[in-house]
Image (spheres, rainbow, N blue to C red):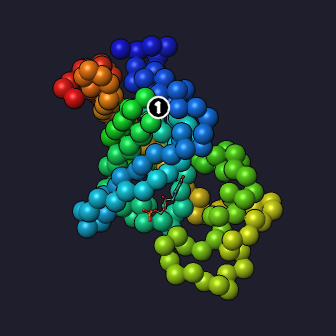
Amino acid sequence: MFENNLPSWRQDLKSSRNKEGKSPSNRWVQLATISERNKPRLRTVVFRGWNKDSSMIIFTDRRSEKIEHLKSNPNAEILWFFFKTNSQFRFKGKIIELTDNKDYWDTLSEKSKSTWFWGSPGKKINPNLQSAYKTLPNLPKSENFVVLNFEIDSVDLLKLEQPIHKRYIWEKKKKWKKTEINP
Ligand SMILES: Cc1cc2nc3c(=O)[nH]c(=O)nc-3n(C[C@H](O)[C@H](O)[C@H](O)COP(=O)(O)O)c2cc1C
C-alpha cells in the first residue's frame, strides 16, 4: 500500500516520468475545472512539485478564469499522459489556494515573475501598459501570483500494453490501496 510512506501510485508516476526523460513537456498537465455555469473547462499548466505526499502545486494568475471557477467549485481533475509508457494518469481532487507563497515566488526567474505584471489573461491587449511583455528586474511578489494546492483523493491509471491493457485505481479513503480494474 505504502512504499517509503508514499502512496504507491507515486512510484508508478515516477517510473513513467523517469522513462519520459527531462523535457519540459514532462511537467505539462491538463487541469479541468467547472465554470460558474457548470461547464467543463480545460487548460495546460505546469506541475511545480509536491506538497506533502499527495498534493500537486500549480502556479497561476489571480485574474485568470480558473480562479473564479475554483471559488464556486473547488473540485478539479488533472490528466497527465506519458507517451513513452502509453500511460494515462487521471487525478481527482480539490484545489485550495496556498496563501503562504513567498518561497514559491522566490523560485521564479525574473522573466517568469514579470508575466504576473503583464495585462490580465484573456482580456483585450492594452498597447499602453508599460509593464507588458518586458522582463523587469527586482520585482516584489505580485498580488496576482497564486499558488494552487491540488489535493488528490483518487488516481486512475490506464496503461496501454500488449496483449491486454492494464488499469488501476487508488482512493485516499481506502488508504491508497491499489486495485486492478477492467481497462
Ligand atoms: C505549455 C503550457 C504551460 C502552461 N502553464 C501554465 C501554468 O503553469 N499556469 C497557468 O495558470 N497557465 C499556464 N498555461 C496557460 C493556460 O493553459 C491557460 O491558457 C491560462 O492559465 C488561462 O486559463 P483560464 O482562462 O482557464 O484560467 C500554460 C500553457 C501552456 C501551453
Left or right: residue 142 compared with residue 162: right
**Image position, residue 137 (x, y; %):** 81, 62
Task: Name which residue lies at 60% across and 83% down.
Answer: 126
Farthest residue to the front: give it: 163
Left or right: residue 133 compared with residue 50: right
Of residues 16 and 77, the one drawn nearer to the viewer in this rendering: 16
Of residues 9 and 103, the one drawn nearer to the viewer in this rendering: 9
Using a 10 Å C-alpha cutoff, classify the residue at mark 1 as few (fewer than 14 neighbours), some (14 to 19) or many (20 or more).
Answer: few
Farthest residue to the right: give it: 137
**Image position, residue 125 (x, y; %):** 57, 81
Task: Name which residue lies at 34% across and 38% down.
Answer: 90
Task: Name which residue lies at 42% across and 49% down.
Answer: 30
- Which quadrant is home to the N terminus? top left
Q: Can you identify the residue that label 1 sits on?
A: 84
- Which quadrant is home to the C terminus? top left
- Compared with 153, 142 (above or below) is below
Ligand 1 under 8 Å from disc 1 Cβ: no
Kindly indicate the quadrant of the structure image that contains residue 135.
bottom right
Left or right: residue 15 compared with residue 91: right
Left or right: residue 157 compared with residue 99: left
**Image position, residue 87 (x, y; %):** 38, 32
Task: Name which residue lies at 32% across and 24% down.
Answer: 161
- Compared with 142, 89 (above or below) is above
Q: Give the tally of numbered discs.
A: 1
Of residues 29 and 50, the one drawn nearer to the viewer in this rendering: 29
Identity, as a three-letter code, of the amino acid under mark 1:
Lys
Farthest residue to the bottom: give it: 128
Determine the secondary structure under disc 1.
Answer: loop
**Image position, residue 170 (x, y; %):** 30, 26
Q: Is residue 49 visible?
A: yes
Q: Is residue 70 visible?
A: no
